[in-house]
Image (cartoon, helix red, strand yellow):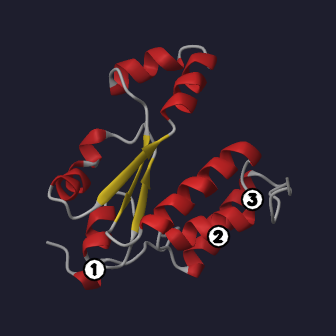
Amino acid sequence: MMSNDDLVENETGGRHELREAQFMLAGKKEVAYFCFDYPKEYFQDMQKCIDEGLFETIKFGAEKNARLLVSIPGAKERALALLGEGPYEHIVVYVPGAKAKALRLIELEECSWKYGYGESIEREIGQILGYSQESTDRYIEKLKQRFPGLPATIPAE
């Protein structure tokens, strides 16, 4: 069993993957985000906590994901083979009292889908997901290397 002191971000970028439930149970994270294609076998600890009423969820994006899968040749077939019939929803999991943060995360994710990566969006997402400033800085630097034109902010509507 991992102690709370063992729950630290890794030095290569701080990802919480496969440890979200432990971070949340330890009070080090209030919100977690799972893409629709997150493997169910990795979601078991989180699902147990949800089933026990420790965490709440918001599911979203099923319609958008269904349209996306149809638009990419072979994607729907791959999704069916890997994930079953769907619905192909993203899931935000949050501790009681953090619903406003969970809803804000969804807004930011949808904004990111619409405009692409933006530094200000990624910083706020990092804060909501409980990442340190250093971890968020490393992640953004990786994004800037991958996408050299990464804007600091998104366009105003």
Disc 1: CA contacts within 10 A as few (<14), some (14-19) or many (>=20): few
**Rendered image quadrant of residue 26:** bottom left
Q: As shown in the figure, which amino acid type bears the numbered disc 3?
A: Gly
Q: Are marks 3 and 2 in contact (CB under 8 Å)?
A: no
Determine crowd level at label 2: few under 14, some 14-19, many 20+ residues with C-alpha closer than 10 A. Answer: some
Q: Please report contact status of discs 3 and 1: CB closer than 8 Å, yes or no.
A: no
Look at the numbered disc 1 and give the secondary structure of its residue: helix
Label 2: which secondary element: helix
Q: Left or right: where does residue 111 sit relative to residue 89?
A: right
Q: Which residue is mark 3?
A: 118
Q: Earlier in the sequence, mark 3 or mark 1?
A: 1
Helix, strand or loop under label 3 = loop
Determine which of the numbered discs, if any, sits on residue 123 in the image.
2
Q: Nearer the viewer, residue 97 or 150?
A: 97
Measured as percent of width and height from the top left, residue 8 is found at 37, 78
Residue 15 visible (yes or no): no
Give coordinates of residue 125: x percent, y percent.
58, 65
When the figure is inspected, residue 72 is found, relative to residue 90, above or below; the finding is: above
Q: Which residue is mark 1?
A: 6
Residue at left 48%, top 74%? 11
- First along the sequence among labels 1 and 2: 1
Q: Is the C-beta separation of discs 1 and 2 under 8 Å?
A: no
Whether residue 26 is visible here, answered yes or no, is yes
| Residue placed most toward the observer, 73 or 125 | 125
Mark 3 or mark 1, which is nearer to you? Answer: 3
Q: Amino acid at mark 1?
A: Asp
Q: Earlier in the sequence, mark 3 or mark 2?
A: 3
- Residue 118 sits in which quadrant? bottom right
